[in-house]
């Protein structure tokens, strides 16, 4: 059996990786900035062009990549621990699809043109609405299987709504705008987007980190967890609310970015004692680093037009599925 890495060392290494990725994100782009020029712009002594590139383009994009990646990684780790399913991620509860549907509705009906805050608010509203529908479908059942089936129904319904919007889009430009948003991107994001997403991500992350010990108890089963004093209903409520609010805020500004919540816990888990609580914080930091590196990749990969972030993360998710499949085949 592989020995786990000490928790402070693991968190320190992941945090250093996230910082390096963020600094690289500030330096690299269509116009590369040297460290000296970047430092001068950050201290207010740089040239006007470097200041615009740093504060209007790259800094909000880097901060959003860190925040969104952290939220997606944390949500994936929490859901895998609660559902005891190694392939669980935010989309398994329909949260990502419902948030995407809210944003697509804003684009389809032209509401996004009214005010920049309308699209994020409708995305967050879609995530919260999916939460209500999830409770309605799952009822008082505390079984993870019931929650997964209810989440599948919500995700399918939201996906059907998105497909309907694309099918009935009034013109090709509207359909293209919807498809571009669904592919996920942090391009042309500003501090306004950051202030929309950050409160939601902070609230969602706090609620998910709160239940670390409850997730550990649930590895013994529902009955054993209740015997140890875990309130299953409150745990489920905090988990669902945290996922809906946090992921809703992330999807609202970044579009539909999948697989981060699936990939990161699988990368982190072998380096820990494999208990759900030990994976939560490292998954958040690892998610921040991974999404920032992926966003850096879409800018440096030579293509005629910039790749979408959701496309890159989807390709990263394939090896994880294959590794899990091969592991399962060896157990058969």
Image (cartoon, rainbow, N blue to C red):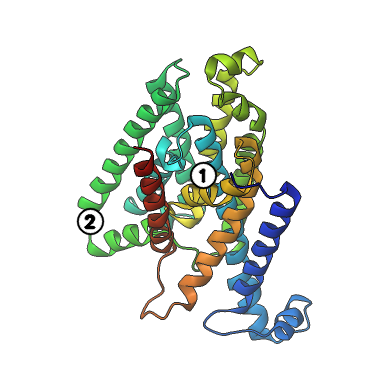
Quarter that holds the N terminus: top right
Q: CA distance from mark 2 to mark 1?
A: 29 Å
Q: Residue furthest left?
A: 167
The answer to whether residue 22 is above or below residue 39 is above
Q: From the viewer's perspective, is 271 left or right of 152?
A: right
Q: Residue furthest front?
A: 1
The answer to whether residue 128 is above or below residue 38 is above
* Residue 196 shows in this picture: no
The answer to whether residue 190 is above or below residue 42 is above
The answer to whether residue 328 is above or below residue 172 is above
Q: From the viewer's perspective, is 317 left or right of 203?
A: left
Q: Which residue is mark 2?
A: 170
At horizontal 30% and vertical 37% (from top left) the residue drawn is 156
Residue 257, position as x, y percentages in the image: 44, 54
Q: Number of labelled discs?
A: 2
| Dot 2 crowding, Cα within 10 Å, few <14, some 14–19, many 20+ | few
Residue 150, position as x, y percentages in the image: 37, 27
Q: Which residue is mark 1?
A: 247
């Amino acid at each position: 059996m592989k020995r786990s890495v000490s928790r402070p060392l693991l968190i320190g290494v992941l945090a250093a990786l996230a910082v390096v990725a963020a600094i690289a994100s500030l330096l690299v782009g269509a116009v590369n900035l040297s460290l000296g020029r970047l430092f001068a712009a950050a201290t207010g002594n740089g040239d006007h062009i470097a200041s615009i590139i740093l504060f209007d383009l790259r800094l909000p994009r880097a901060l959003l990549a860190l925040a969104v990646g952290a939220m997606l990684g944390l949500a994936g780790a929490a859901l895998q621990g609660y559902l005891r399913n190694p392939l669980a991620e935010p989309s398994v509860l329909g949260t990502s699809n419902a948030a995407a549907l809210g944003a697509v509705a804003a684009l389809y009906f032209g509401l996004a043109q009214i005010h920049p805050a309308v699209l994020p608010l409708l995305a967050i509203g879609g995530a919260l609405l999916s939460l209500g529908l999830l409770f309605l479908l799952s009822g008082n059942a505390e079984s993870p299987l019931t929650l997964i089936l209810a989440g599948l129904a919500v995700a399918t319904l939201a996906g059907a709504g998105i497909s309907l919007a694309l099918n009935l889009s009034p013109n090709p430009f509207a359909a293209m705008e919807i498809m571009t948003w669904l592919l996920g991107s942090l391009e042309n994001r500003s501090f306004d987007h950051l202030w929309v997403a950050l409160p939601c991500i902070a609230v969602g992350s706090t609620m998910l980190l709160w239940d670390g010990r409850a997730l550990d108890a649930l590895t013994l089963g529902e009955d054993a967890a209740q015997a140890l004093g875990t309130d299953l209903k409150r745990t489920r409520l905090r988990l669902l609310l945290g996922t809906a609010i946090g992921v809703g805020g992330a999807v609202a500004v970044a579009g539909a970015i999948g697989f981060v919540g699936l990939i990161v816990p699988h990368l982190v888990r072998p380096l820990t004692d494999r208990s759900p609580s030990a994976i939560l914080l490292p998954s958040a930091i690892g998610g921040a680093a991974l999404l920032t590196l992926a966003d850096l990749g879409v800018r440096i990969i030579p293509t005629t037009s910039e790749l979408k972030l959701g496309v890159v993360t989807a390709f990263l998710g394939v090896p994880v599925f294959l590794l899990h499949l091969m592991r399962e085949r060896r157990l058969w």
